[in-house]
């Protein structure tokens, strides 16, 4: 099974668990919302990074890697559902289709996001019989990168402050789940999490700069989501601070540092190639050029 198929199967199986697996009565609209929020899934960048790190480290318990990849993507999808709500970005479109609150209603969007978050941790917990120690570390890592003080909830929280710590804001809002991806991939394969922090942080920073560039260079039809959100909501933006050329140069520097930060492991060369591949995909080349919907 190819990597993409493996990831999609893991996510699909997780959603089936959340929908009751056909074994119990569930609210049909909410069950449908879980699937709608996660499929089609864009580029699946975070679980791909997680799986790539796990395989570079040996991937000796693939069922745990699968669960970790699914759990991480469920958290990411939940964050998008909540980000799009009227109380935050009030977005109408995500990944080229109506956002969950537009398609299902605002109450169901809140419940969909909440359900995906809880489901992510259930999917991990279900694998505890294969390695309780690894699963416990995975749950801890994902919790830390989801909530407070340095997870994506903190990232969203910075937007309500009068003064924003730009570094903390970017690392929490965008970097947190990339740090989770590299660390969880290592933990799933029985390795220590800490050496993989820098790689995840650098990839996350690069992704934020690339997102700022796409927001400045592309239109909504190309991205499959609204553009100009940073300007609209008064958020920090690399293009506003550095200009297009400066932000592009900064992106290349970050990605070069990411490759240099890869810890020594069996699949180090393949992992470096994956980062180079993402460097090409992330770097916008011109306005109105098709971009991956992430």
Image (tube, rainbow, N blue to C red):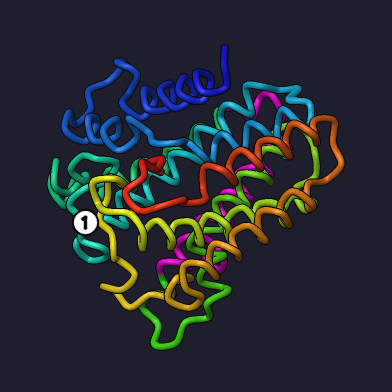
Q: Quadrant of residue 97?
A: top left
Q: Which residue is mark 1?
A: 91
Q: Is residue 47 left or right of residue 140?
A: left
Q: Is residue 148 magenta?
A: yes
In which quadrant is the N terminus drawn? top right
For the residue pair 89 and 252, the one nearer the viewer reads as 252
- Residue 275 x/y as whole percent: 66, 42
For residue 201, say whether it is visible: no
Q: Residue furthest top?
A: 1
Task: Specify start and end residues of the magenta stretch as a single range.
Answer: 127-156
Q: Quadrant of residue 59?
A: top right
Q: Is residue 215 magenta?
A: no
For residue 241, say whether it is visible: yes
Give the prevailing secondary structure in the magenta stretch.
helix
For the residue pair 131 and 105, the one nearer the viewer reads as 105
- Residue 56 x/y as whole percent: 76, 31
For the residue pair 97 and 256, the one nearer the viewer reads as 256
Q: How many marks?
A: 1
- Residue 188 x/y as whole percent: 69, 34
Q: Is residue 80 left or right of residue 89?
A: right
Residue drawn at x 70%, y 32% as measured from the top left? 54
């Amino acid at each position: 099974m190819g990597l993409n198929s493996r990831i999609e199967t893991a996510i699909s199986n997780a959603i089936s668990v959340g929908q009751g697996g056909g074994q119990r009565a569930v609210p049909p609209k909410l069950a449908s919302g879980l699937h709608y929020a996660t499929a089609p899934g864009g580029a699946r960048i975070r679980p791909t990074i997680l799986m790539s790190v796990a395989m570079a480290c040996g991937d000796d318990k693939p069922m745990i890697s699968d669960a970790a990849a699914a759990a991480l993507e469920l958290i990411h999808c939940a964050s998008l559902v909540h980000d799009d709500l009227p109380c935050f970005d009030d977005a109408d479109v995500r990944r080229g289709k109506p956002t969950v609150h537009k398609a299902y209603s605002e109450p169901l969007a809140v419940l969909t996001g909440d359900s995906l978050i809880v489901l992510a941790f259930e999917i991990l917990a279900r694998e505890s019989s294969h390695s309780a120690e690894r699963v416990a570390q995975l749950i801890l890592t994902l919790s830390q990168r989801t909530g407070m003080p340095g997870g994506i909830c903190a990232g969203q929280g910075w937007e309500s402050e009068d003064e924003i710590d730009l570094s903390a804001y970017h690392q929490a809002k965008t970097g947190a789940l990339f740090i989770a991806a590299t660390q969880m991939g290592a933990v799933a394969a029985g390795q220590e999490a800490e050496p993989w922090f820098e790689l995840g942080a650098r990839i996350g920073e690069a992704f934020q700069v690339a997102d700022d560039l796409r927001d400045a260079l592309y239109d909504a039809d190309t991205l499959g989501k609204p553009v100009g959100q940073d300007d609209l909501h008064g958020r920090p933006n690399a293009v506003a601070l550095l200009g297009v050329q400066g932000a592009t140069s900064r992106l290349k520097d970050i990605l070069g540092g990411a490759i240099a930060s890869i810890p020594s492991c069996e699949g180090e060369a393949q992992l470096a190639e994956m980062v180079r591949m993402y460097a090409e995909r992330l770097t916008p080349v011109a306005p109105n050029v098709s971009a991956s919907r992430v």
